Image: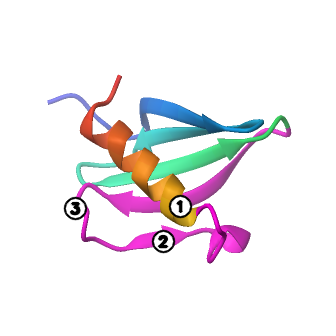
Amino acid sequence: MADMTDAYCGEFRRGPAVFCVFRFDDETYRVEADDGNGPSPVCRLTDDPKGPVNWHGAWNGDRWCSWIEAEARKVIKNPE
């Protein structure tokens, strides 16, 4: 089986921000955001919809968290 570390899965957008989802390992995904200033980490989550989401820095508790998680899970379910 091919190495899936840091495999691009897809992206979604909101306003000027582009969120990219990467498969980090067999069960973990990483979301990064780029609002024109370069990519920065948003969160890590598993493919289990009931699993925890680990938010990075200022994203923890952000009003977009629920939306970001929902969009990331759509990408995880149907990667490009």
Residue pictured at 45% horizontal, 57% vertical: 69
Q: Which residues are magenta?
A: 37-64
Locate residue 27: give its quadrant: bottom left
Residue pictured at 60% horizontal, 47% vertical: 32
Farthest residue to the top: give it: 80
- Residue placed under numbered mark 2 in the picture: 54
Amino acid type, label 2? Asn
Q: Earlier in the sequence, mark 3 or mark 2?
A: 3
Residue 21 percent location from the top left of the image: 47, 41
Q: Is residue 72 left or right of residue 79?
A: right
Farthest residue to the bottom: give it: 61
Q: Residues within 10 Å of mark 1 (few under 14, many from 20)?
A: many
Residue pictured at 44% horizontal, 40% vertical: 22
Amino acid type, label 1? Cys
Residue 62 percent location from the top left of the image: 66, 70
Under circle 3, the secondary element is loop
- Residue placed under numbered mark 1 in the picture: 43
Does the magenta-highlighted stretch encompass residue 2? no
Under circle 2, the secondary element is strand
Q: Earlier in the sequence, mark 1 or mark 2?
A: 1
